Image (cartoon, rainbow, N blue to C red):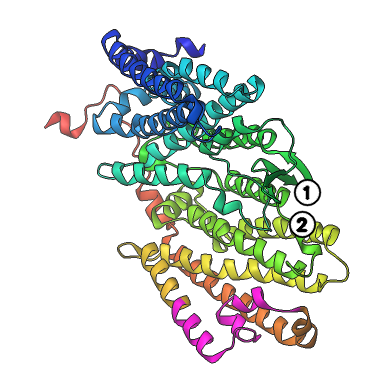
Amino acid sequence: MNLFSNPEIIRNARIQLRPRRMLIAGGLSLALSAAIVYSFLHNADKVPGYPGSLLHVILIIQCIVLVFGGGIACLHAVQREKDQNTYDSQRLTRLSPWELTLGKLFGPPLMADFIFLCFLPAAIIGAVQIHASWTIVLVTYVLLILGAIVFDALALVISLYLRRGTVTWAILAFLYISYAASSPLWSATPYFHLGPIGPFALLELPSQPSWSTADTVTQIGPRSFTVPNPFHDVFFGAPVHHALVLPFIYLTLLAWFLLAAVRNIKRDPENYELYTPAQALGFIYYLNFIVFSFFGWNSIQDPGISSPLVAQSLLLGLNMPLFFIFGMLVLRNRVQVRRRLHAAEAAPSGLDFLWPVPYIFAGVIVVGAAMIGIVEWKHNPALEWSLAFAIYQVIFFAVWLSVDLLFLQWMNLRRGRHPLALGVLALAVYYVCVSIIVSALHLNDRAFTAILLPTPIFVLKSSLWTTQIAEWLVALAAEAAVALFFALLCRRQLAELQPHPSSISMNAPAPSASPGSASPSASL
């Protein structure tokens, strides 16, 4: 189906782009832009440069309208239909999930797109005023529109899961995410060389005189200062312009968000599943590829900045919330397990007892192997590094995650109200209490402490590893024994949920009566 003939887009266009509404919105936008243009042209001699210039101000307004206005409209795209009890009729239409997703993605932000276009004449005047490069201005607008579409797709995915009373919190969270993704604070570290990916970070792009990634030198009196180029990224040690990186990140993120929306938009809200386990694992691999590509691998060659062991611990720490969230998303509750067992009509397999350990191990081992391989390639041989300890650290990380997720899986299979929330609370209380005791006793680098807390793995030195190999192997074995214990508890819960042959026969449908025979209820 052609995008312009999509019924959902046409419906939103008829609602939002009525002549009266367009006249009011366009008149107000043009009046505001005319006032801003007159103000800047009247005080052109007082404009210090691009920051604070006419083009800069217009870009800020357009970015707010496109990102915030369009994103909030997409947040209401599905949630408002659910509140008005019209979403079920849309799910039953002949539109495919892909067509319905495109309609929800491009239909609700139409008014924001129209207001965005109303400010373009003022932007053109601002570009002429500061003699900006038309190529850079054009790339800025292309990336701004593409970035806004990515955030609209994220808002659409969030809208699928919104319920009545949660829209305000979702809007605040979306605004914070949009701002945080555009803030340079998260990338201002020697370990990561990737600029902000939010659309608001593009507002400074027209100020660049060329596509060079070199730093600029500013002369103030007798002293000169070097100003770092904010669009200078480092891809595996090679400099690259940020404007070349953003299209790849935007398009790949858009593909992941559209995948989540397409596979859920026509489902019943009770059966939403963001990704399959394999797809979620692929998303983790994708995020790790981004992190590994722009990680400061050159910094681990400098003993004054970092070391290979610190770099590996930092990367494992970044993966900790990713794999924990992934494990939480794939946990199964009692209803899901019972349906699965009834559909299979067979005893639980070993994969059911260990769920979700196989996916966790597969993900951690692949990520850890890539991590160790790059460190082996990039690290300075003179710095402290142990391949055996690096492998042990990855395996222990996988086993420790498996213990926590097996515990939560066991809690989720138990009877009671909100068993998973109770399990997460118990796990949090446990780690807080143990961390306080370990810190008070200064036992952060002891092998037996790793049985209770994973902190020693992240602060362990290769010198302690070589002198206490046996103790650390015992700690790993003890952690594996705890994982096996929780796996047996999950097996016991699965045995209780397994259907008996008698219940299967009783739940089997009764044979239908012949057309010529009367049923007992009919005779009565």
Relative to 325, is 279 above or below?
A: above
* x then y, percent, for residue 299: 76, 60
Segment tinted magenta in the rendering: 432-461
Name the residue beneath numbered marker 2. Answer: 297
Give the percent coordinates (x, y) of residue 296: 73, 55
Mark 1 highlights which residue? 236
Q: Left or right? Give the position of 426 relative to 474.
A: left
Q: Is residue 366 above or below residue 165?
A: below
The amino acid beneath tag 2 is Trp
Q: Quadrant of residue 70?
A: top left
Assign the magenta stretch its main secondary structure: helix
Q: Residue 482 occupies which quadrant of the picture?
A: bottom right
Query: How far apart in space, not on screen, are marks 2 and 1 (Cα)?
Result: 7 Å
Q: Give me the residue at 57% from left, 89% from top.
A: 442
Q: Nearer the viewer, residue 288 or 112?
A: 112
Q: Amino acid at mark 1?
A: Phe
Depth check: give the residue in front, 171 or 364.
171
Q: Is residue 446 magenta?
A: yes
Label 2 with label 1: CB-CB less than 8 Å: yes
One can see residue 266 in this view: no
| Quarter of the image that includes the C terminus | top left
Which residue corresponds to the image point at 59% horizontal and 81% vertical from the top-left?
A: 451
The reply, left or right, for residue 287 in relation to residue 383 is left
Disc 1 crowd rating (10 Å Cα; few below 14, some 14-19, many 20+) is some
* Image quadrant where residue 195 sits: top right
The outermost residue toward the right is 381
Where 13 falls versus 81 (above or below)?
A: above
